[in-house]
Image (tube, rainbow, N blue to C red):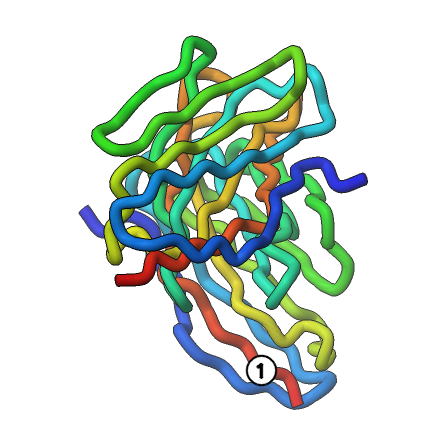
Amino acid sequence: NAGVTQTPKFQVLKTGQSMTLQCAQDMNHEYMSWYRQDPGMGLRLIHYSVGAGITDQGEVPNGYNVSRSTTEDFPLRLLSAAPSQTSVYFCASSYLPGQSLGSPLHFGNGTRLTVT
Amino acid sequence: RKEVEQDPGPFNVPEGATVAFNCTYSNSASQSFFWYRQDCRKEPKLLMSVYSSGNEDGRFTAQLNRASQYISLLIRDSKLSDSATYLCVVNRANTGKLIFGQGTTLQVKP
């Protein structure tokens, strides 16, 4: 049971380049989400999904796109990278929040992205 | 005002001490509450869920105060290995959003 798999672990981009961060989970979780973590800012929600075909914006969605074509996968796309997107990105999944007492998030190992 | 607020610390305590962290949330209809632990440059990991009646897991005790809209984490008999950042997480009511606090850093010294 792999849990949440995130790739790549490290990435360096030039300003204006595009890329996709991959996230896959094998726990049949309905809920998947992307966070970014910056020093002094904590984890901030970028986008989330409560099921295949359904996505919604989090706290800091600008500059990022997502899609959820299957239950297992939730890729995050940076269409035109900017230095402000330098951060550590975490994908996380769980059963639907609020549906059962305690639906803890399972995190991937993170992607460290630098945009120059 | 942030939706979920924590004192970032750091809290510096000696081994064996008891330390408590609070976390306040602004949405009174929030439904689920958690404490996560994050070690430097690693992914957060669930420490414990917070139940309405309060709950304990070994040296760790979590409490929820809905009237005052805060949750707390108490760590007894601190160990060096407890040094980490502790993140408060709240489920925004009627949405799929799990919102994190900034985190509280704990340093346990010998």
Q: Position of residue B85 (x, y in %)?
A: 44, 54
Q: In this view, does A61 lie above or below A20?
A: above
Nearest the viewer among A72 and B96 is: B96
Q: At x 58% / y 35%, what residue is drawn?
A: B23
In this rendering, position of residue B18 left or right of residue A96: left
Query: Does A35 sit above or below residue A55?
Result: below
Q: Is residue A27 above or below residue A14?
A: above
Q: What residue type is labelled 1?
A: Thr
* Residue under numbered circle 1: A114
| Foreground pick, B73 / B77 | B77
- Is B93 positioned to the left or the right of A113 in the image? right
Quadrant in the rendering for residue B24: top right
Residue under the point 57% across and 18% down: B31
Kindly identify which chain the residue marked by label 1 belongs to.
A
Q: Depth check: B108 or B104 in front? A: B108
Quadrant of the snapshot with the C terminus of chain A: bottom right
Q: Position of residue B73 (x, y in %)?
A: 43, 33
Q: Which structural element holds mark 1? A: strand
Name the one closer to the observer, A106 or B61. Answer: B61
Numbered circles on residues, count: 1
- Where residue A43 sits: x, y (%)? 58, 53
Q: Percent position (x, y) of residue B55? A: 34, 18
Which residue is at a point 51% across and 19% down the rendered structure image?
Answer: B64
- Outermost residue on the left side: it is A1
Res. A80 image quadrant? bottom right
Residue neighbourhood size for the residue with mark 1, other residues' Cα within 10 Å, grouped as few (<14), some (14–19), many (≥20): some
Q: Is residue B42 above or below residue A79?
A: above
Identify the residue at image location x=35%, y=26%. B61
Task: Check the image and name the residue furthest to the right.
Answer: B1
